[in-house]
Every structure is written in C-alpha cells, then in structure tokens.
Image: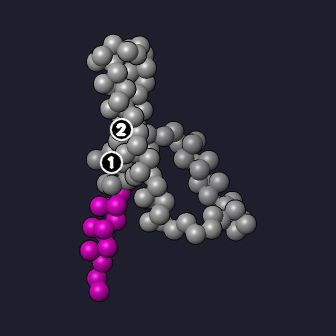
Amino acid sequence: MTNISSLMSTSAIQGAYTRSKELAADNSQKPEGKNFSEMLQVASEEAISKARVTDSVLEAGLEGKIETQQLVEAVMALETSVTVAISVRDKFVAAYQEVLRMPI
C-alpha cells in the first residue's frame, strides 16, 4: 500500500493542511455547487484524459514522430496520476473497512 506521505514532502503536507484550515475559516471561497462526488468525478475524468493523451503520445513515439524526451515526460506524468489514484483508492478502502469494524 502506497503511503501518501511518501509522495509529498512533510512541509508540503503541512502547508496544505494550513491552507485547508484557512479555507474552512473563509467561507467566501467555497465553490458553489461542488460536492465531494463531483470533485471525485472531475479528478477521475482528468486522470482518464491524461491516460488517453499518453496513449496517443506513445503511438506517436512508436511512429517516430516525437522526441524520446516528450515520450518519457508523458509516461512519467501518467505514472504520477496512477500513483495518486491508487493512493486515494487505498485510503477509501481503509476508511470503508474502518466503518465496517465500528460497533452498531
């Protein structure tokens, strides 16, 4: 299981936590009409879109139409997206299992 803290530095995590507290205190920046499921849908659509772009870049690389550097960058970007998606999935599974262990 991938730990999210292995993907980000401690200072980045602390900065994000501090920023989230500021946003919670300031309700004027709250996005209208966005709920958690919509945000998840947008994130998954972006990941799928990035996978499709990478696929087309790989095809162009096999045909010799692009540089190797562009190919490597596209694959690394996709790898990052997949790693984050797997980390989020693992967190959801862990949270679900924790809820199942709760006494009724």
Q: Please say whether residue 14 is visible from this viewpoint.
A: yes
Viewer-proximal residue, 55 or 78? 55
Q: Please say whether residue 75 is visible from this viewpoint.
A: no
Q: Which residue is mark 2?
A: 52
Residue 60, quarter of the rendered image? top left
Stretch of the chain drawn in magenta? 91-104
Q: Position of residue 95 (x, y in %)?
A: 34, 65
Q: Main secondary structure of the magenta part?
A: helix
Secondary structure of the residue carrying numbered label 2 = helix
Q: Which residue is mark 1?
A: 86
Q: In the picture, which quadrant includes the C terminus?
A: bottom left
Instruction: Give the residue at x 59% y 54%.
Output: 17
Instruction: Give the residue at x 73% y 66%.
Output: 28
Q: Is residue 72 above or below residue 17?
A: above
Report if the CB atoms under discs 2 and 1 are less than 8 Å apart.
Answer: no
Q: Is residue 63 above or below residue 59?
A: above
Secondary structure of the residue carrying numbered label 1 = helix
Give the class, few, some or many, for how many residues have Cα within 10 Å of label 2's Cα (few <14, many ≥20). few
Q: Which kind of residue does numbered mark 1 sit on?
A: Ile
Instruction: Give the residue at x 33% y 13%.
Output: 64
Viewer-proximal residue, 14 or 28? 28
Give the class, few, some or many, for how many residues have Cα within 10 Å of label 1's Cα (few <14, many ≥20). some
Viewer-proximal residue, 31 or 1? 31
Residue 19, quarter of the rendered image? bottom right
Which color scheme did the rendering employ for the protein?
one colour
Q: Position of residue 33 (x, y in %)?
A: 58, 69
Judge whether residue 78 is colored magenta: no
